[in-house]
Every structure is written in structure tokens, then in C-alpha cells.
Amino acid sequence: MLTYIVRRILLSIPILFGVALISFLLVYLSPGDPLAQFRVPNVRPEVLERLEEIYGFGKPLHEQFFGFITNYVQIWNPDAWGLSITHRRPVLELVVERMPPTLLLMGTSLAITVIVAIPLGMLAAIKQYSLADKIVTTFATIGYAMPSFVLGTYLLIVGAIWLGVFPFRGMTSSLSVAGDPLDIAWHLVLPVSSLAIQSIAGWSRYIRATMLEVLHQDYIRTARAKGLGANRVNFRHALRNALIPVITLFGLSLPALLGGAVITEGIFSWPGLGSFGLQAIGQRDYPVIMAFVLLGGIAVVIGNLIADILYGIVDPRIKY
Amino acid sequence: MAESTYEARRVQIEDTEDIDRTEVRSYWTLARQRFVHHRLAVIGAITLVVLIVAALVVPLIAGDTTGVSASRSFGAAEVISEDGELTLALLGYSRTGNNLFGQLMAATGTSLMIAFAAVLIIVLIGILIGSVAGFAGGWVDNILMRVVDIALAMPGLFIIIAFVAFWGASVWTVILAIGITGWTLAARLVRAEFLSLREADYVQAARALGATPRRIILRHMLPPALAPIIVAASLGVADSVVLEAALSFIGFGIPPTQASLGTLLNQAFEYLNRDPILVLFPSVVLILIVLAANFMGDGMRDALDPRQRVEQR
């Protein structure tokens, strides 16, 4: 197991290197000037020259990339991920600062998704073709077809404009960062619903399908034939096996914890990593953009690794 | 001698003329029949065709559909104007005199055009990379699949936004951005199909007969690999329409002066407090397209590749 994990981590290094290289080329080869905001008459030429020197924009591309990548791995150094051009502070510090709201938002919606979608999918599969099944499948199909930003807008109309119950945007009512938990929870309702409803739709469809597949297996028929009760068959024999493929889904959702909700965060002005990344694109803050892309890559690699490890734990047929 | 045997056999064949024969049905005939029996898929196909026709025709009739305007005046809905002209202003006019239904259909046209073009790029790149990897195998396959891994590890939406923002917001950059980030699934499908076809007897036979790799790929391996590509393409249309709308919605997509479902939504969001109903029209069209494309994709998967059918509908 340990050798497997170590090997997987080693194998992910070239992938992350590739992610860094491609995103570096994408960002640094694109037209436009990241220092454009400083090219105004009241910034002296010496200052501009120093800025160019700090960020190294004048150097040849391969030197820039080499310098970038050697800095990047020195995670213990607070300046390792460079300085944000607009915020004039270390990127690493800014990223860490913006992480908790995103983790809170995405973690809550993932937890709700798991709690709601598994029973829904199971119910639909056990009572296939029943009214309950039809309701769940219809909901799942519509929810799946409704993009989260459309759903978010609908929720804003109903919850914030018509009912006037929920806040329109932001994470806290006052401007202070540390709000009281109830206030934050109140602000969480709409964005979390818009994210959760969509993923519940996708998950319950998937769980229904895997559960149906398992229910048609021979060992389920055997279990029923030897007189086990419906609950025991459904929960102990079927559900456990139906959940194995769901772990893949879980692993795939983990990267979204860090930056998947770019658009939802934008709609609700949620002060997390996603809206931070959007601002960085708007302001051509290259170091921040690179940090965002690489963080995404690392999250994908880790998510896949966690899914594979969980697979080995829950499914004794898989050995590493 | 040989002549007479042939004659004899011919007579024999003619004798069997009146025997009950089942009609020979080709793969595509069968696929079409299976598709037609898939009710939701047919509904999806009809919806898409209606939307495409409306997107092409309505803006021609509807007069001024240019620009994106969000303000709406109530009660002006009409089909034929007071002068007896056909206007199809089902949703009334904006304060600046734009025919809102015409505008919605023009926007639908732009969004569908972007989605189709992006899917074309996705399919072409997918076929190219997938077929090379699957046909060559070995280290070529290995390298190309690591490229796929890298592409999968990148935050797609964020890359698309950055690409469009840096290279200038236009219809073309949006198409390119969606196209060059979305090919991984198509490539994997083609590769998987090619890897199994490579060892198929008839491909080995073609190789033994001295067919060039080009001929083997184009004539013998690509046609059977088309089924998963067609399915992936129709699902890709749904994804691409959503991506365009999302990009334009947050203001990083096509320029706000051009009507697309995304820019209409963006404008409607600005007016959310005053006129929330405006969001409804573009978003409903968007959801319709996604549903229709998904149903069509499901139907085509069942029709083209019955082995993959999960459950009876």
C-alpha cells in the first residue's frame, strides 16, 4: 500500500510539471501586458524597471519558466509562489487567506450531496418504475440539465427578491471577515443550494444506475432466496457494493473543493478562491493565475489518489 | 463444366425465389429503427431541429434583433404588427425597439453555432489523437495518454476563461477555447475503440493484404469507431452550450454587444431586481437545448451501440 502511494505520488510529478508548463505557456505567450496598470504617467520609469526585474518579464521565456518552477517547489518559503501584481503580497499568503470560505462552501454542499443523494438514488433503484422512482428520475434529469448559474439565479430571484428572506450576496452582513456562525450559515443557504441541487441530481442518477446493476446480480438473488429480509439485502448486500463506484465520483468532486465553483462564487460574491481567480484573470495577475491552475492540478492528483486508496479499503478484491 | 455448375446453381437460386425471406437490414437501418423507438430521443431531436430552424428564420422576419437589451415593456406582444406585417414579437419589444423574441432566437442561433463549431474541433482533435494513440500503441500511446492526463488535471473552466480574456473576447476565441480544452473524452473513446479493433481479424487481414496504415485507419477502423464519437458529440453540444452561456454570463465570454444566451442572461442578471422574469426566457431555451441534446445522446448510444445499453427504458 505504502509503496503504491509513493509510486503514485512520483508518477504525478511529471503530470504536474506538464500542467505547469502548459499553463505557463498559455499565460506568458498570450498578448497583452501584465504591468499595463502601472504604465501611467505618474509611475516613474525606474519603478517600472524594478517591477519588470522583480517579475522577470524581460527575460527569455525558458529562463522565466525555470526560475518559476524552482521557486514553486520551495513551499516552505512564504515568497515561493511569487508576489501578486495587484495585491503586492505573497501569492501563497493570499491563497491561504481565501481558502476557508471556499472550503466551507464546497464542503457543505458536498456533505449535503452525499447525505441526500445516496438515499434518493437507492430509493429510486429499489422501487424501480414506482412513482417515487419517476419523481427522483425526473428531478435528476432536470437538475442535471440546469446549469448551476441558472439555478443560482433562480434561487436569488425566489429567495432574495420575492421572499426577501436570504441575503443577496457576500458571506457576512458586516464587512468584518470573522462573522458570527449563524450569519454565515444564513449567507450559505442560497449558494450551497444551487451547488448541491445540481450535484444531487447527478449523484442520485449515478447511484440509481449502479444500485440497479448490483440488484440484478446473482448473489443478491441468492441472498433473497435464502430468506434474508429486504432491508438486510438492500443495505448490507447491495448498497455496500453499489457505493464502490460512487467513490470515484467522490474523488472527482474533491478538486472542486478548492476551485470548482468559480461561477457560483462570482454570482453570490462569495469571497473565496474562485472569485479570487476570476479577479486575477481580469487584472492579468499572472502569479496568482499560475497558483490557481497549479493548485487545481494538485487537487485533481490528490483527489484521484484518495479515490484509489479508498477503493482499496472498501473493495477487498482490489489489492495494491 | 464450370459453366454448367454455375447454371445449375442459378436455377436453384431462382427456385427459392418464393421462399419467405426476411429483409436484409444494414447496421444503420437497425440503428435508425432503434433510435425512432426511443421516445425521449425523438422528442429531443425534434426540439433541436425546431430551435435551429427558429434561430435561422425568426431573426430574418423579426426586424431589429441586433444588440442586447434587457429592458422590457409589457403588453406589446404581437404576431402581426398594426401595419399587417408579420413580426413574431411574441415577447414584445424592448424600450429601444428591439423585438425580444427575435433577439432570443438570434441568441439561440449564436449559442448553437458556437457549440457546434466547438464540438467539431473537439471531435477532430479527439479523432486525431485517439486514432494515432490507439493505432500506434506502445510509447506513442503512452506519451499521448500522459498528455490526456495533464489536460484532465487542469482546471478546464478557469483555463477557458483565462484564454478568452487574454486573447480578446469574441465568438472565435470562445469556440477555440472550448474546443482545445474539451477533446480528452473523445480522444479516450476513439483510442479505446482503436486498441480493440487493432487486433480484430478483419483488420489483421487488411494488414496482411498490404493495406497502408492510412487505408486501414480511414476505411476499416474509423467507421466502427464512429458510434461512440457521435454519442460524445451530441453530449458535447450540451456541455458547450452551457460553457458558452457560463462564460458570457460572468462577462468573460463573447462581447456583450452580441446576443447569445449567455449575454442575454448577463444583461437580465443586471436587471434582476427590476425585472426578474427576463432571466426566464434565455435560461429556459438553454435548459431545453441541454435536455434535448442529452436525450438525443442517450438515444444514439442505445441505437448505435446496443451493447452499452444500461437498462430498458
Image (cartoon, rainbow, N blue to C red):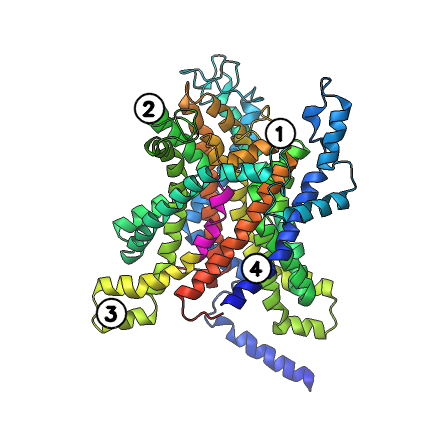
Separation of marks 4 and 3 at Cα, in angstroms: 43 Å
Q: Which residue bears the numbered disc 2?
A: A164
A87 left or right of A1 in image: right
Distance between the Cα atoms at labels 1 and 2?
36 Å
In magenta, the rendered stretch is A248-262
Q: Chain of mark 2?
A: A
Asked if residue B244 shows in the view, the reply is no
Callout 1: few (<14), some (14-19), or many (20+) C-alpha neighbours within 10 Å? some
What's the residue type where badge 2 is placed? Gly
Check the image and report above or below for A162 versus B36.
above
For marks 2 and 4, give the one nearer the viewer.
Answer: 4
Disc 1 to disc 3, how far (Cα)? Answer: 65 Å
In the image: residue A35, left or right of residue B295? right
**Both marks 3 and 2 on one chain:** yes
Disc 3: CA contacts within 10 A as few (<14), some (14-19) or many (>=20): some
| Amino acid type at mark 1 | Thr
Instruction: Report whether mark 4 lies on the same chain as mark 1.
Output: yes
Which residue corresponds to the image point at 53% horizontal and 36% vertical from the top-left?
B52
Total numbered labels placed on residues in the image: 4
Q: Residue A261 colored magenta?
A: yes
Disc 3 target residue: A224
User: Label 4 near label 2: C-beta < 8 Å?
Assistant: no
Residue annotated with mark 1: A86
Query: Residue under circle 4?
Result: A9
The disc, 4 or 1, on the residue closer to the chain's N-terminal end is 4
Q: Are marks 3 and 2 in contact (CB under 8 Å)?
A: no
Mark 3 is on which residue type?
Arg
